[in-house]
Amino acid sequence: MKSKQLLITCLWVFLATFQVAAQVEEYPFTYSLGQINITLLPEGGQQGSKDILIGATDEMLKQYVPEGTFPNAVNAFLLETPENTILVDAGFGRKLFAHLESCNKTPEAINIILLTHMHGDHIGGLLKDGKKSFPSAILYIPKPEYDYWMSDQEMQRLPEDRRGGFTQARRVIDAYKDKLELFVPGELEGTDHEIVSGIRGIAAYGHTPGHTAYLLESEGEEYCIWGDLAHAMPIQMPYPQVAVTYDTDPAKAVESRQRLLKYVADNNVEIGGMHIEYPGMVKIKGNAADGYRYILTCTCEGVLR
């Protein structure tokens, strides 16, 4: 993949020099993939707890999560193609609109929204005062995801005090019902399932029943926005078999992670993730036998993790 120009809006020199990302405001930045500009819209970093991990042994934790916590984040992405202005997920919505404004984008400028899945930290920014935040946008939802959140049977599996996620998802679906597109994600090996020009939806089920990654292609280059394929990078890269309590189907989530990790490592495809620590973009090295490692895109001369 040819080198990319990183266009950092503010304070990156300070951030890189002193390596205190946790203490510094995180700003959007943009880099190019052929004719597509990809902008990270960060909503903030925090520490995740080892308590959410499924299948992590004491030995794994001692080596990769010695303090009992790991870096985490909430991110969304803005894509600018020759034809479209696209939002991939919407975070909680706490910083989304300020970040879009800093990128000279109004909510009306967004004409497509792609959802990886419908957890609250991915759809929170889609509504304001019960109305859609992006009046011009077509909302694309993977059909298995839509079917899950619209299922009364699935909702009733939960006690009443834990059905808020279904209520929130249905409010979003209702608000965008006049501009709603359902699609069935494809496989990595396929060439179809292009949702819009240059972007394919890839089935990455398990975290939720319809969890979807997006594979971007422009001028022979590829980039993958993998949503919630991983929540705990320091341990889920060397040990992809470690799941999290947030996964609807942990075994399927592990299978999706292993499959996608092999593809991006073998093909040198860079990654954007909704829960990858700032700057939210990484390269994956290694293989299934020896374990994978990751390196933050903006510190490519740093140490592999």
Image (cartoon, rainbow, N blue to C red):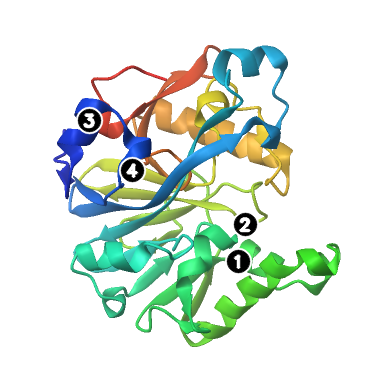
Which-is-in-front pick, marks 4 and 3? 3
Say which residue appears at 45% left-offset and 32% top-offset: 263
Q: Residues within 10 Å of mark 1 (few under 14, many from 20)?
A: some
Distance from label 3 to label 1 (Cα)? Answer: 41 Å
Numbered mark located on residue 223 in the image: 4
Give the mark nearer the N terminus: 1 vs 4: 1
Which of the labelled discs sits on residue 143, or is there none? 1
**Mark closest to the chain's N terminus, 3 or 2:** 3
Percent position (x, y) of residue 182? 54, 71
State the separation of the CA atoms marked 4 and 3.
24 Å
Q: Where residue 111 sits in the image (x, y, percent)?
A: 32, 75
Q: Pinpoint residue 248: horizontal percent, then vertical percent.
A: 72, 49
Mark 2 or mark 4, earlier in chain: 2
- Name the mark on residue 16: 3
Question: Which of pointers 2 and 1 lies earlier in the amino acid sequence?
Answer: 1
Please rate how many residues cluster around mark 2, counting C-alpha atoms within 10 Å: few if below 14, some from 14 to 19, many from 20: many
Q: Is residue 69 above or below residue 189?
A: above
Q: Which residue is mark 2?
A: 210
Quarter of the image with the C terminus is top left
Q: Position of residue 75 (x, y in %)?
A: 42, 51
Distance from Cα at disc 2 to Cα at disc 4: 20 Å
